[in-house]
Amino acid sequence: MTIQEAKPTPRKVNRVTGTVGSLGVGVAVLWLSVIVLLPLAALTATSLEGGLRGFWDAIMAPGALASLRITIYVSAVVALINVVFGTLIAWVLVRDEFPGKRYVNGLIDLPFALPTIVASIVLLSLYGPESPVNIHLNATQAGLIVALAFVTLPFVVRSVQPVLMELDREIEEAAASLGASNLTIFRKVVAPVLAPAILGGAGLAFARAIGEFGSIILIGGNIRGETQVTSQYIQQQLEMDRPGAAAAVSVVLLVFAFIVLLVLRILANKAARREEQAA
């Protein structure tokens, strides 16, 4: 047999990756348009029914400004609380062993499955006027914070937990062998790795908090200028047959949430790049 005869015959490669990829992109864009872009476009159009002047008047109304201020403040506090306690819970679930750990890990996802109105009923029963523990948070901003912290806790925990699971503990052990304290190890070794996940979880928690309605509808009290959040103000405008004003405030809330998520995403990406360069 000659070399020419022994040479394998080239096989024709059927390039289907590009076709499948294009089809996938088309379906994804179509689905995104139907589910997200078209509703957002309709909301924006509704908010501009009265023109730019009507839009401005709607978002600058005293009730709208008060509700936005309360919503942003409470959501920021909740995000910070979840950063601390969510990271701590994730650390305990990954690094410590204790009886019932599997059940505790399952309970973290309960706010995802539980209807938020049920959470509001439970919190009202526990911290309302007839509180069995003598803690009264009904119609207070503290009640709003507790309710929102409950529904947003899983975001930080589930963002940090997988990063902790993949973290190389040999680096921590090496730092400890060199005499570094636990605080120094966490600050210098662990925190930089966890920073992108923590920022991402905080952003998701904040975005969920500013749009939350069900969990605060009962315990919040809906007091204008004190505990009325923007979602309740929007509902109030709809009940008063002011869909344009409701849509305008909704657009402002969406834009603010998008900006916060974008900034946190940029910060998380920068932190991840710095960690890669350091490695």
Image (cartoon, grey):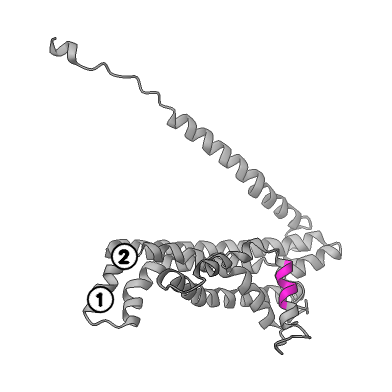
The percent position of residue 175, horizontal first and vertical second, equals 25, 76
Q: Earlier in the sequence, mark 1 or mark 2?
A: 2
Q: CA distance from mark 1 to mark 2?
A: 12 Å
User: Which residue carries the number 2 mark?
Assistant: 168
User: Can you tell which quarter of the image residue 269 is in?
Assistant: bottom left
Could you say whether the residue bearing mark 2 is in a helix, strand or loop? Answer: loop
The percent position of residue 249, horizontal first and vertical second, equals 71, 65
User: Which residue carries the number 1 mark?
Assistant: 175
Residue 216 visible to the viewer: no
Residue at (78% x, 86% y) in the render: 130
Mainly helix, strand or loop, the magenta region?
A: helix
Tell me: 72 left or right of 85. Answer: right
Between 168 and 40, the one nearer to me in the picture: 168
Which residue is outermost to the right? 240
Could you say whether the residue bearing mark 1 is in a helix, strand or loop? Answer: helix
Residue 207 visible to the viewer: yes
* Crowding near the residue tagged with mark 2, few <14, some 14–19, many ≥20 C-alpha atoms within 10 Å: few
User: Can you tell which quarter of the image residue 164 is in?
Assistant: bottom left
Q: Amino acid at mark 2?
A: Asp
Residue at (72% x, 87% y) in the render: 136
Residue numbers of the magenta segment: 117-123
Tell me: 131 left or right of 172. Answer: right
Residue 2 is a magenta residue:
no
Q: Quadrant of the N terminus?
A: top left
Residue at (54% x, 78% y) in the render: 81
Residue at (55% x, 63% y) in the render: 259
